[in-house]
Amino acid sequence: MSTRPDTTTPGPPTYPPNYAHTFRRMYASVIDIGLLLIIIYSVRWVTGGNAFTGPKTAPQDIFILLGYLILFTGLRGQTPGKMVAGIIVVDAEGHVPGVAVAIPREVVGRLIATAALGLGLAWISFDPKRQGWHDKIAGTYVVMKPKAERPKAPQNERFSPGERRARQRPWRFRRRR
């Protein structure tokens, strides 16, 4: 009888299709815009005001903005704003989409969604699967990330947290058995 070691590796986590509400996505966007503004003003201060504005604007300035969205969404499925809001970008199978899907979602999709006077972003409120145009272009969904379960307390505990132990006396008043 031969025993083979288990060579199956666990795949990437799969997230259930619990679509994120519009306001939760707006909350994440506000946090991301705030963080991007902090990055922009920090880089401008370091470069003496030459970054992001004026004739000395370098192409790498644009890559900072796009890299923030593409790398976080492609590698983790979440920007820092989405992490705080508890939402994650997934593909049709429920996995993190990857950089190859994040590029059309964040560059082409967002450009089209906002160029149409924001109609592509407002579409999130009316779509049954809460997809904006940028999500539809890339085939992605934004879902609620399940919270990690807390370990359960052992069953032999006789009190709940915050409750005083009435049966146990202080050590100096204990009876000897």
Image (tube, grey):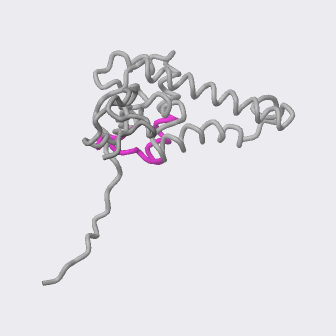
Q: Considering only vertical position in the picture, is 126 above or below 104?
A: above
Q: Residue at x 38, y 31 (%)?
A: 142
Residue placed most toward the observer, 22 or 107: 22
Q: Is residue 106 left or right of residue 94?
A: right
Q: Considering only vertical position in the picture, is 161 above or below 24?
A: below
Q: Residue at x 31, y 45 (%)?
A: 14
Quadrant that contains the N terminus: bottom left
Q: Considering only vertical position in the picture, is 143 above or below 5?
A: above
> Can residue 130 be seen from the camera position used here?
yes
Region rendered in magenta = 89-108
Q: Residue at x 42, y 36 (%)?
A: 173
Q: Considering only vertical position in the picture, is 126 above or below 87?
A: above
Residue placed most toward the observer, 8 or 90: 8
Residue placed most toward the observer, 128 or 177: 177
Image location of residue 162, percent across then percent down: 40, 27
* View extreme (bottom): residue: 1
Image location of residue 159, percent across then percent down: 31, 32
